[in-house]
Amino acid sequence: MLTRGRLLAAFMAFTLMMAAGAAAAETAKTLDQVLREAQQSRLESQRPGQSLPSDAGQLQPLLDKLKAQVAALEAETQGLVARTQENQSALAVNKYQMTAKLGTLDDMFLVARQVAGDAAKQLADSLISGELAGRDKAMAAIAANGELADLNRVGEVWLALLREMKAQAEIKRFTAPLIGGDGTESQAQISRIGPFVAVKAGQYLEYVPDHGRFRELGRQPGGKFLDAARNLERPDPDGINSLAIDPSRGSLLALLVQTPDLEERIRQGGLVGYVIMGLAGFGILLALERIFTLRRVSAKVERQRRDLGDLRADNPLGRVLLSVNGQGTRDVEIIETKLDEAILKEIPPLEWGLPLVKLLASISTLLGLLGTVTGMILTFQAISLFGSGDPKLMAGGISQALVTTVQGLVSAIPLLLLHSIAHGSSRRLGQTLEEQAAALVAERMEAGAS
C-alpha cells in the first residue's frame, strides 16, 4: 500500500501541476509564477507527517473532481482556439475590404513616399539647405515610414517641393555659418542665385552636405567669373549685370577651379617651354624695335624726298645723295658707282636683326616639336612603369607634349608676322633709295647731254 500511495501522490501532484498551468494560462500568469506554484505544491506533498489516504475509495472523489476540471479546461481551450480562428478570418476579411476601399489611395501614398525619398536626397545636396537647414530630415522620415501615411504627411511633401521651387527662383542674401580657408567657422553674409552658386565678398563658395555648412573654395576661377561674383553682391541698378551660374550645381565650378591658368600652362611645358618663351620674347622685342626704327627712318626719308634742295645727313636718302654732291655732270659713271656704293652701305643697317627674327621663328617651331617628342617619351615611360589604368599618371607627359607644341606655334606665328612687317618696311626704304639714285643719274645725264 505504501508503494501504491506514493504513485497516487505523484499522479495527484502531476494533475495539480497541469491544473495550475491551465489556471495560470487562464489568468495570464507568467511562467515564473507557474513554476513557483508547481514547486510549492511539490514541497507540500513531500512534507513529513502528511500521507494520502490508503483507501482508493477515498481518492476517487478527488480524482473525479480533477478530471472534471481538466475536461472543463480542455473545452475552454477548444473554445479559445475556435474564437482565434474566427478572429483571424475576420481580420483577413477586414484587411481585404480595407485594401479594396483604399484603391488608388494606397498607390498615392506609395508615390508620396518615393517622392519624399528623392526629395530628401535632392534637398540634402542643395546649397539652399545651407540657408534652410533640416529640410531633408523630414522628407527622409516620410520616405522611411512603411506604415499607411496620412494626408498631412502627403501635404508636407507637397509644401516642401513648393518651397524648393520658390527658393530656386530667388536671388537672395542671408546669414549662415561659413567655414573659412583656415578651418574656422563664423557667421557671414552670403548671396546665392537659386541652387546654382553662392558668393561671399566676391568669392565663390561650396556647400558641404555632410556638415550642412558653406566653405570657401581653396582656389577661385578666372577673372571674368570673379567679376560676375562681384556683380551679384554689388549690382548696377541702372544697367544690365552679368552673373555666372552653375547649372550642374557645383560640378562645373569644381572643374573650372581645377583648370590651369596661364602660369600653370607655361610650367607644364617644362624646360623646353621656358626656352621657347624666352626666345619668343626676345624675338618679339627685337622685331618691334626694328619696326619702330624703320618707321622713324621712313618718315625722315619721306621728308627728305619732298625737299631735295636741302640735303641732310640724318637719313639714308640724304647721305646717299650727299655722296655725289659736287660731282660734275660729265662724270655720270662715277656718280652711278658712288650712288651704288652709298646704297650698299645703307641697306645693312636697315635689314639688321631681321634674319635673326626669322631664325627665332623657325627655332621656336622646332623646339615645340622637341617638347612634343619629350612629352610622349615621358608618357610611354609612365605607361611602362605603371600601366595605362590610371590616366592621371600619363597626364604630365601628355600636357608637356601639347603645351610645348602650342608654345612653339604661338611663338612662331607672331615672330613671322612681325618679321614680314619689318622686312616690308626695309624693302620699301631700299626701293626709295634706288629710285632717287636712278632719278639723280638720269637728271645728270640729261644735264650733260644738254
Image: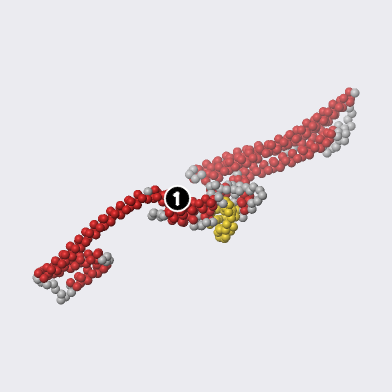
Image side of residue 125 versus residue 101, left or right: right
Residue 317 position, x and y percent, is 82, 34
Image side of residue 196 versus residue 64, left or right: right
> Which of 13/321 is in front?
13
Asked if residue 217 is positioned above or below residue 296 in the image, the reply reads below
Residue 190 position, x and y percent, is 58, 56
- Counting the numbered discs, the total is 1
Image side of residue 382 versus residue 332, left or right: left
- From this viewpoint, is residue 448 visible? yes
Name the residue at 83% across, 36% down: 303
| Quarter of the image where one finds residue 30 | bottom left
Residue 223 position, x and y percent, is 63, 49
Name the residue at 62% across, 49% down: 228
- From this viewpoint, is residue 180 visible? no
The residue labelled by disc 1 is 115
What is the quadrant of the N terminus in the image? bottom left
Farthest right residue? Answer: 450
> Which of 294/373 is in front?
294
| Quarter of the image where one finds residue 439 | top right
Decide: few, some or many residues near mark 1? Use Cα within 10 Å; few <14, some 14-19, many ≥20.
some
Name the residue at 68% across, 36% down: 416
Name the residue at 68% across, 43% down: 281
Q: Amino acid at mark 1?
A: Val
What is the quadrant of the C terminus in the image? top right
Residue 188 position, x and y percent, is 58, 58
